[in-house]
Amino acid sequence: MLHSRAINETHALRQILEVTRKLAAPFDLDTMLNEVVNASLNILDAERGTIFLYDVATDELVVRVATGVGSFRIPTGKGVVGESAKTRKLINVPDCYADSRFNREIDKKTGYRSRCMLTIPLIGYEDSLIGILQILNKRTGVFDEQDEFVASALAAQAAVVLHRVKLTEAMIATQKLDREITVARDVQMGTLPKVMPKITGYDVSGTFSPTDQTGGDLFDFVQLAGNKLFLLMGDATGHGIGPALSATQVRAMLRVALRLGATLDEAFVHVNDQLVEDLPADRFVTAFFGLLDASDNIVRFHSGGQGPIMHFHAESNCYDWHEASTFPLGYMNQTRLGDPMAIQMEPGDILGLISDGIYEYENTAGVHFGQDGIIKVIAEHPEATADELVRLIMQAARHHGGPVPQADDITIVLVRRLAGDSLHSK
C-alpha cells in the first residue's frame, strides 16, 4: 500500500514538473490557463476545472477559463470561491450539497451535478491575489490530502507563471500606450506655429512646455488681411492625451471659422457651442480669442475663463491685469456674448498671454512665481525682444521653483509694439 502511494506521488510529481516545463514556454494568457486546467484534471483525475481571475477594480472573481460553464462574476467573500479568495486558503469540500457555502444555481443552469471540489487560491508576489483554481468531481471518490498537496503545488506554479504573463501583458500595453502618447505629442507639437508672424510695427513670440508628454495648453497665430493678427491662447482642463485633443480641436475649429470669414464674436460663439456638444460635462477650455489690428493698434478680445491678461504700459511703466470677460469654452451655450474688450497698444507696450503654469509655479516654500516674477523680468530687461522675454520668463520661473518640478502646462505669448526707433530699424 505504501509502495503504491509512493508510486502515485512520484507520478504526480513528474506530471507537475512536466506542467511547469510547459508553462515556462511563451504562452498567451488563455492558452496558459487552459494548460493549467487540463493538467489539473489529468493529475487529479477530475471531471471539470475553472480558473477565476481577480478583478481588483470591482473586487470580483471573473471566470476566464472553464469546462462546461459560461462566463460569470462572483463577489469576493461569496460562496466557496469567495471564501477562498478572502482567506487565501485551500478549501476541500467532500460533499457540495451538504455545504451551506455551495452555490447550487450554477448546477441548475448547466444541468451538471457537483459532488466534491477543491478550491485553491492563486497567490502572486507579496501575497497578492491573482485568481482561484477550482477542480470539481474526482472520478474515484473525494479529494484527499495527497490531492490537496498536488493541487497546491500546481497552483503555486500556475500563480507564478500567471503573474509573469500579466506583467508581460502590462508591459506590452504600456509600451503601446507610450507609442500612442508619442504620436499624440508629435501631432500636438506639430500644430504649434513653426515661425513667429510678421506684423508691421510688432514683435511677437510664443512657447509651450507641457507637464507630461502632451498637455492641455495651446497657442496659435493666424495672419489675416489688412495687417491683422488673430491671437489664440488656451488651457484645456487636465493633463495628458484628453486635454491635448481638446486643445487641438479648438485650434482646428478656429482656423476653419476664420477661413469661412467668421468675425471675432462669431468664431468665439461657434467654437464654444460646438465644444458644449462635444466635451463631457466636467471638461472645458479657458481661452483668449483676440484680434490685433495694426492699423489702429487695438487688440479686441474675448477671454473665456482665461486670466489675468497682462498689459504693460511702457510710457508709465505700469500694468493692467485684465480678468476673464466670459465663461470658458464648452461650459455653456453662448446666448448673450458681450462686446469684446479692447486694449490700446502704445509704442513699447506688451500684451502678455501667460498660463497658470507660470503664475502658479511654486518654490519649496509654496510661494508662487506670480505677477511679481513677470514684472521683475520685464523691469530687468527693458530692451529685450519678445522672444528673449519669453525665454527669460521661463528661466526665471524655473529658477524660482528650484528643485520643485513643473506642476502645470506652461504657455507664454508676448506681443510687443515696437517703439519708433525699433520700427524704423525693422
Image (spheres, grey):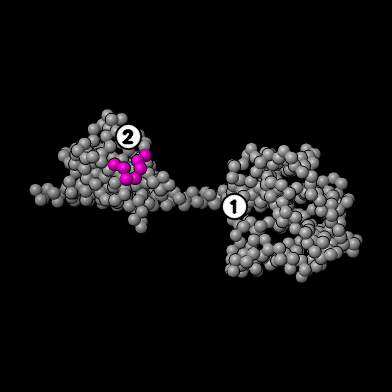
- The foreground one among 94 and 185 is 94
Q: Quarter holding the C terminus?
A: bottom right
Q: Which residue lies furthest to the left in this view?
A: 1
**Residue 106 % position (x, y):** 30, 34
Q: In which quarter of the image is residue 46?
A: top left
**Residue 229 % position (x, y):** 81, 49
**Residue 390 % position (x, y):** 73, 62
Q: In which quarter of the image is residue 314?
A: bottom right
Q: Quadrant of residue 62?
A: top left
Which numbered disc covers residue 341?
A: none
Residue 404 falls within the magenta-colored stretch: no
User: Which residue has dot 2 on it?
Assistant: 69
- The foreground one among 423 and 296 is 296
Amino acid type, residue under disc 1 in the picture: His
Residue at figure coordinates x 87%, y 62% from the top left: 419
Query: How far, Cα to Cα, is label 2 from label 1?
Result: 43 Å
Q: Can residue 16 be seen in this view?
A: no
Neighbours of disc 1 within 10 Å: few (<14), some (14-19), many (20+) = some
- The foreground one among 209 and 309 is 309
Neighbours of disc 2 within 10 Å: few (<14), some (14-19), many (20+) = some
Q: Give the side of residue 379 with respect to residue 141, left or right.
A: right
Which residue range is magenta in the image? 73-79
Asked if 324 appears above or below 270 in the picture, the reply is below
Q: Can residue 251 be seen in this view?
A: yes
Residue at figure coordinates x 81%, y 51% from the top left: 342
Tag nearer the camera, 2 or 1 = 1
Amino acid type, residue under disc 2 in the picture: Val
Residue at figure coordinates x 30%, y 36% from the top left: 67
Residue at figure coordinates x 71%, y 54% from the top left: 307
**Residue 138 % position (x, y):** 20, 39
Which comes sooner in the sequence, label 2 or label 1? 2
User: Which residue has dot 1 on it?
Assistant: 239
